Image (cartoon, helix red, strand yellow):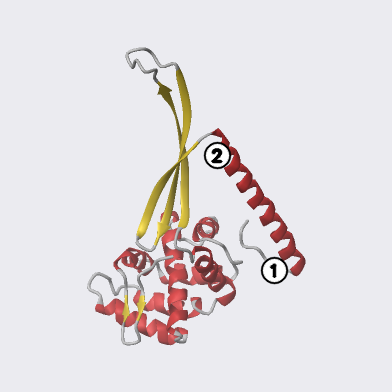
Amino acid sequence: MLGGWQPIMALLRIPPEAKPFLKKVLGLSPETLSKLTAWLREQPPALDVSGLAARLNASGVGVNQKDAEPILALLTTLYSVAKQTELEPEAFAAKLREAIVADKDLPSTGLDAFLAQLTDLLKLHDSLGITSKAIEVLTEDPHVFLGARIITDMRPVFPPEVTRAPTAAVIVHNLKLEYQHAGGNGEFFIALDKNDIEKLRKVLDRAVLKENSIRELLSKAGVKCLME
């Protein structure tokens, strides 16, 4: 979800990182925007924008494949920002109009068509709304996991006379964890040996078992789990 929005009642401030996304939306034709709204209205909630974008790319709505994820990211963010302002959809759309018109970096072409659909999009509480809220809940942590990689190397052990060949060796696994935080992205490394990997494997296996138990509980309660 795109951060940096400041829903000040006097004027909505558009963060710089959101402007390329807005330009993509403003570049959509009125027909495509209408189809996108109708398509989103029929969609079940999703846990992340990428999953929703994959569905959109297969829908035939007419959104360029490389633009699907940025556009959906913007729409989920706008839904969240609108909720923060506690404004009705029409009033929020008016505030957004003021912000876009006042911003020299953004075009006004396509603005009327987009805002006409935005008021309807902001009312899609059971599809776009649940997706937006799910993304917030999932990522509302100081550090959010992005990726991991393990680099394995062999380290020789030399005898006291270092001119002699190594007499032993150890194997070290460096676990690289990439994460997202409020200030951007970060990474750190943890050195592991074989025993550490087994401990980590058991912890992760246990987490999978606990998730399966919770899924079963949710299913019995009739609550949909968004994580496939």
Q: Position of residue 39 (x, y in %)?
A: 55, 67
Residue 42: which quarter of the image?
bottom right
**Left or right: where does residue 204 sit relative to residue 94?**
right
Q: Is residue 98 above or below residue 20?
A: below
Q: Is residue 52 above or below residue 101?
A: above
Q: Position of residue 109 (x, y in %)?
A: 31, 73
- Amino acid type, residue under disc 2 in the picture: Asp
The residue wearing badge 2 is: 196
Question: Which disc is residue 223 wearing?
Answer: 1
Residue at the outermost front position: 160
Q: Is residue 8 above or below residue 109?
A: below
First in sequence: mark 1 vs mark 2 = 2
Q: Nearer the viewer, residue 24 or 145?
A: 145
Residue 142: which quarter of the image?
bottom left
1 or 2: mark nearer the eye: 2
Residue 15: which quarter of the image?
bottom left
Q: Position of residue 123 (x, y in %)?
A: 53, 80
Which residue is at a point 70% across and 55% down the rendered structure image?
212
